[in-house]
Amino acid sequence: MTPSAILHIGPGAFHRAHQAVYAAALIDAGHPEARIREVCLFPPRIGHSLDVQKGAYHVLFRDAAGQELRRITSIGEVLDKPHEDFLSDPALRLVTMTLTEKGYCHLPGTRKLDPSAIASDLEDPLQPRTGIGWLALGLARRQKAGLPGLTLASCDNIPANGRLLQAVLSEFVDQAWPALASWMARNVSFPVSMVDRIVPRVDDEASETISQLAGERDMLGVAAEPFGQWVLENDFALPIPPLDKVGVQIVEDVRPYELMKHRILNGAQTAIAHLGALSGFETSCQAANDPVMGSWLARFCAAQARTLTCPPGENLDAYVRTTLERLRNPHIRHSLVQIGTDSSFKMGQRIVEAAVHHVDGPEAELYALTIAAWLQYNTGRNADGAVIPVSDPLADRFRMIVANADGNARALVEGFMELDLFEGRLRHHRDFKERLVTLYSMLERQSPRDLMMATETSKPEEER
Ligand code: CS2
């Protein structure tokens, strides 16, 4: 088998529809070394299914214009569990990973290790249980084998993901593998990357359609939108396979691209997750295709774009138009509850930073409604009293705030504004908080969609 220059940790649906598709294009372009060795840290383990399927699975790209089923064979060997030498292949150049936010074992909102999340690996670094612990062990073995360094590229949707990875891994190595610290500092690079493709959880319909179109049962098939983007910081310990040949943007500074994606696409998704779910919609495309919510969303995306500096080679107006089209894609059934999951991690970079930008301007109303809907969503009930399944690391804290407020909207708003994520201007902005109290009280009686409609029809004709 051709040696793999790429190893990926965490081959979930997103990875199979994103990095593995870029690798497939690279192999087609004459770079067999782009075949990926996969490492599963946790179930689902894909090794058995991939064996049964002889190393192939499918991605079904779908949008209003049609669908395309692509057979992907870029995944080579799968380690259903890492072993201590998993980074010791001399051919290895690039390690990518999708560990999820929790996988970085950090204290939320910081780049510091959470001692309780990494305790067991600190106690026994030779038997790691976390991705961070495995990376440290793998690098220590690589150092011992006298091999050159590596590039470790986080592909999680977290601001400055490479900086976070570098910080937590360095802190862990300082404590658990002190003899590795200076080798790692000299030989390992941690580029930041921005990855984008909407890949909803695979449901029965998607899975059956893929199997039918493929003419065989596909246990690893994924349905996704055709749009894809990968922007990678130009910081590589060793030359890597030429991803730029297949559309990956290699840039000096990923930050403006990341802000664009987090604010415009992810911001819109998070805003409609709460506004839409409270209005009775189930998926983001249902909400985005609704005329009332759709026109609100267009205003919101334009407001988000005005908080940004345009990244080189991009066009923010076009990005907004594409984002709205992507969200209206009728074949991508992305559940609003799925997007609403762990939203306390997401609100800061997606909504709150831009709200601060607009807090004294005419668009403050958009942000007050977005945040009021987030509060209402996290009370666990909509205006009709129906239960909303809140799944969030702060869920207990939310319940406490609601209980302490005891039905008083002002107390509830004050309680939520004490959360770390509102630290800064919003928390102390009297007018903004007044708006939140008013809008939250209105949302206790009517859905956000009804409220949007009422506000729109009360405007003079020329403003509509
Ligand atoms: C979504 C993202 O669930 C969510 O938080 O907003 O998974 C989103 O679909 C991706 O970032 C798109 O690249």
Image (spheres, rainbow, N blue to C red):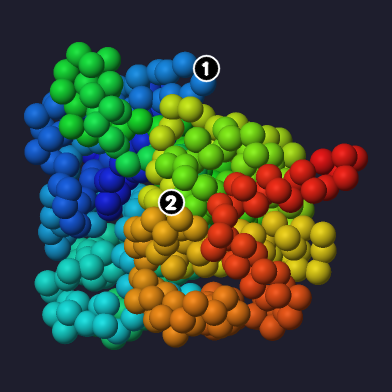
Q: Residue at the location (23% across, 46% down)?
A: 38
Q: Nearer the viewer, residue 399 or 417?
A: 399
Q: Residue at the location (14% across, 63% down)?
A: 84
Query: What residue is pinned by disc 2?
Result: 339
Residue 239 visible? The answer is no
Q: Is residue 40 above or below residue 438?
A: above
Q: Residue 210: percent from the left, percent from the top?
A: 27, 22
Q: Residue at the location (16% across, 84% down)?
A: 123
Residue 172 visible? The answer is yes
Is label 2's Cβ within 8 Å of ligand 1? Answer: yes
First-in-chain label (1 vs 2): 1
- The type of residue carrying mark 2 is Ile
Q: Nearer the viewer, residue 128 or 245?
A: 128
> Is 424 placed left or right of 54 in the picture?
right
Query: What residue is pinned by disc 1?
Result: 65
Q: Residue at the location (47% across, 45% down)?
A: 280
Instruction: Please tell me whether mark 2 sits on a helix, a strand or a loop.
Output: helix
Query: Residues under labels 1 and 2: Cα distance?
Result: 25 Å
> Is 93 placed left or right of 65 in the picture?
left
Is label 1's Cβ within 8 Å of ligand 1? Answer: no
Residue at the far right in the pictured view = 462
- The type of residue carrying mark 1 is Ala
Q: Is residue 109 above or below residue 219?
A: below
Mark 1 crowd level (few <14, some 14–19, many ≥20, 10 Å Cα): few
Quadrant position of residue 186:
bottom left
Q: Are marks 1 and 2 in contact (CB under 8 Å)?
A: no
Quadrant position of residue 55:
top left
Residue 189 has which mark? none
Q: Residue 207: percent from the left, percent from the top?
A: 25, 28
Quadrant position of residue 440:
bottom right
Considering the image in quadrants, where does the N terminus appear? top left
